[in-house]
């Protein structure tokens, strides 16, 4: 184990050592840090040197924020930050990748009706697909969703309840490191959404899809919609 790894994330949190940092991914890291309550003063102390640009343009500033996230936020590691930011960036910032993924999901949906259950980054994909879909969706379920994160919201085509969705149900575990904004309500997402933010997933994996699906509220919501 080298010194950088022992201290937290390696030299490049997002793309790996030697690669040029991407502004979208840097903004996402800072969003995570802000939501975790990490202050500018703490980042300055972590850097242990004066900093002028306290923004994504300063890579050292972002790296220091990343190290603090790994130390202060349960279940978040350097590899987690790298994978999550890279996956979100690839889907939202590369049209070809997004269109390929959206086509696969759209084909599975067909014309409906369909109860659509999504999880993690899949909630972002499902949301984008439904914005353009005419599929009849009586229930859209988002579990452990990052849709409330400002950087992600800014990259979405628009913020609204997809027109083909009758009911939107969002559920989150407050310890889930992906669902930084557990409630998708009018404070951070302008759409009519039913929220449950006190899901109790297993302590070992508060973001896991199985924990969400085994929750009684979630399973009953899905089962009742399917039965209807």
Image (cartoon, rainbow, N blue to C red):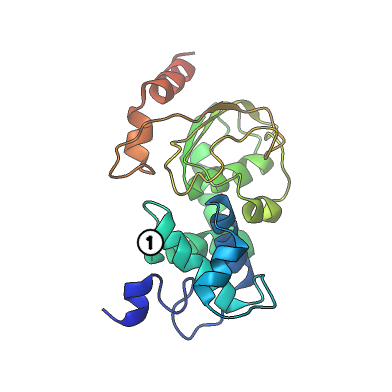
Say if residue 94 shows up in the picture. no
| Pick the front one: 25 or 100 | 25
Q: Nearer the viewer, residue 188 or 62?
A: 62
The answer to whether any part of residue 73 appears in the image is yes
Specify few, some or many for label 1: CA neighbours under 10 Å numbering under 14, 14-19, or 20 or more.
some
Classify residue 181 as left or right of residue 1: right
Q: Position of residue 111 (x, y in %)?
A: 58, 33
Q: Is residue 92 above or below residue 148?
A: below
Q: Secondary structure at mark 1?
A: loop
**Residue 147 drawn above or below residue 183:** below
Query: Looking at the image, which is closer to me, 195 or 5?
Result: 5
Looking at this view, name the residue that lies furthest to the top: 228
Quarter-of-image position of residue 91 = bottom right
Q: Could you tell me which residue is drawn at 49 percent across and 71 percent down?
A: 14
Q: Position of residue 197 (x, y in %)?
A: 50, 31
Q: Report the quarter where the N terminus lies.
A: bottom left
Q: Position of residue 64 (x, y in %)?
A: 51, 71
Residue at 55%, 27% in the rendered image: 195
Write down the quadrant of residue 130 in the picture. top right
* Residue at 54% in and 64% down: 42
Residue 90 occupies quadrant: bottom right
Residue at image coords 57%, 80%: 49
Residue picked out by circle 1: 77
Which percent across, then down, holds residue 118? 48, 39
């Amino acid at each position: 184990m080298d010194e950088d790894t022992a201290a937290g994330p390696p030299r490049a949190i997002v793309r790996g050592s030697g690669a040029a940092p991407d502004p979208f991914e840097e903004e996402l890291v800072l969003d995570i840090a802000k939501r975790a309550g990490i202050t500018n003063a703490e980042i300055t102390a972590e850097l242990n040197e004066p900093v002028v640009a306290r923004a994504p343009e300063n890579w050292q500033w972002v790296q220091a924020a990343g190290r603090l996230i790994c130390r202060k936020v349960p279940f978040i590691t350097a590899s987690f930050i790298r994978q999550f930011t890279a996956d979100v960036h690839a889907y939202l910032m590369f049209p070809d990748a997004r269109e390929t993924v959206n086509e696969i999901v759209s084909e599975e949906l067909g014309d409906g009706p369909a109860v659509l259950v999504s999880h993690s980054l899949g909630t972002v994909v499902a949301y984008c697909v439904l914005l353009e879909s005419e599929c009849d969706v009586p229930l859209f379920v988002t579990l452990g969703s990052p849709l409330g994160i400002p950087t992600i919201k800014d990259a979405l085509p628009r913020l609204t309840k997809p027109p083909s969705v009758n009911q939107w149900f969002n559920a989150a575990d407050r310890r889930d490191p992906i669902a930084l904004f557990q409630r998708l309500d009018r404070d951070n997402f302008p759409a009519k959404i039913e929220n449950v933010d006190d899901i109790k997933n297993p302590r070992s994996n508060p973001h896991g899809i199985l924990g969400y699906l085994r929750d009684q509220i979630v399973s009953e919501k899905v089962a009742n919609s399917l039965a209807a």
